[in-house]
Image (spheres, rainbow, N blue to C red):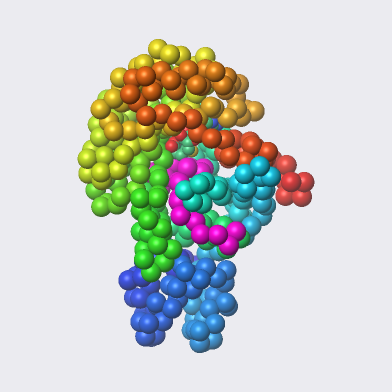
Amino acid sequence: MTEKTDMKSMELSELTEFVTGLGERSFRAKQLYEWMHKKLVPSVEDMTNLPKALRDQIKEKAEYVSLKMVRRLESGIDGTRKYLFGLADGNVIESVFMRYHHGNSVCVSSQIGCRMGCKFCASTLDGLVRNLTASEMLEQVYRIQADTGERISNIVVMGSGEPLDNYDALVRFIRLLSDENGPHISQRNITVSTCGLVPEIRRLAEEGFSVTLALSLHAADDETRRTLMPIANRYSLSEILPACREYFEKTGRRLTFEYSLVAGVNDTDEEAERLARLIKNLHGHVNLIPVNPIKERDYRQSDRSRVEAFKEALVRRKINATVRREMGRDIGGACGQLRKGYLEKGEDTV
Ligand code: SAH
């Protein structure tokens, strides 16, 4: 069986080629694109200004990727919503909607599972199942937009998966997301978080985008970093940080360094000092995340006063640092745990 065309992952020029290939005029491509990326309809049947014959042809030749909401949790504290979406092949993925004073933000998954193996992360425990397509990444945003009825202005690719391990789909996702004929989300409001894949960081710097790069650092020396993140065995900080500098120089976007604080592992004042020295000329800002414990590992969160002291040690050394506010505490659990709990307990009991 030949694979059907994934229409929602196509740029307008590709879609135009597809539509004219069916013997249709090119304005139909524009209409189709609008239904998918502006009006966000859940099915081809909803595209009411397309002739029925064309809709039938599209359904036969193309796949219309649309996610199904399987579960939704809403915080009574801050309005954060966690979603579990079902994909056509039966897999499920997690996405999060957060309200900030600067606008609404969606945290998008880029893969089902992950193969990076970071020790404190729930998404990687069962390895990588498969990459998500650009359309499956977009649909997380579209379904949340449709569900909340609110404009989404910020996207963080910080859900399950390593976005730079799914490079082509990521780049397509960014192009479609920021396209003025589609959702038109500013690239300046898109952040891509990576555990540090050096060749792909350099490649992303060349795309001509203005998206923010967040590097998951989590340690200020290679040795400690290797105990937390297997990828540190492949790339040392002496390779990663110059790639980040290049990213900043090419894009002009300030870097974000993510640092999850794990009690007794990476949270002393000496480590803060080492971190400050490591990144002092890199035009970055540090985002401290008290580690979210997962039941499969015994990592503990640094206590509140240690987190503050670590932050102060950075600020004293002129490093811009903030502690990530925990959103949706009452619908808690670390990232990736909603999906994991669902898979473990089975469909009926969650
Ligand atoms: N693969 C990407 C996205 C991962 S999720 C990356 O590595 O950057 C976004 C951030 O959350 C990363 O910095 C990741 O290391 C961190 N993270 C994952 N699980 C966590 C946990 N249980 N507690 C705190 N931070 C966690």
At horizontal 62% and vertical 41% (from top left) the residue drawn is 328
* Above or below, 215 relative to 54: above
**206 sits left or right of 54 in the view:** left
At horizontal 33% and vertical 33% (from top left) the residue drawn is 284
In depth, the one of 219 and 329 nearer the eye is: 329
* Residue 218 showing in the rendered view: yes
Give the x, y percent position of residue 95: 56, 49
At horizontal 55% and vertical 47% (from top left) the residue drawn is 98
* Above or below, 108 relative to 183: above
* Residue 130 showing in the rendered view: no
Region of the chain picked out in magenta, as a range: 148-166
**258 sits left or right of 41 in the view:** left
Does the magenta portion include 156? yes
In depth, the one of 171 and 87 nearer the eye is: 171
In depth, the one of 224 and 326 nearer the eye is: 326
Residue 212 falls in image quadrant? top left
Give the x, y percent position of residue 329: 64, 37
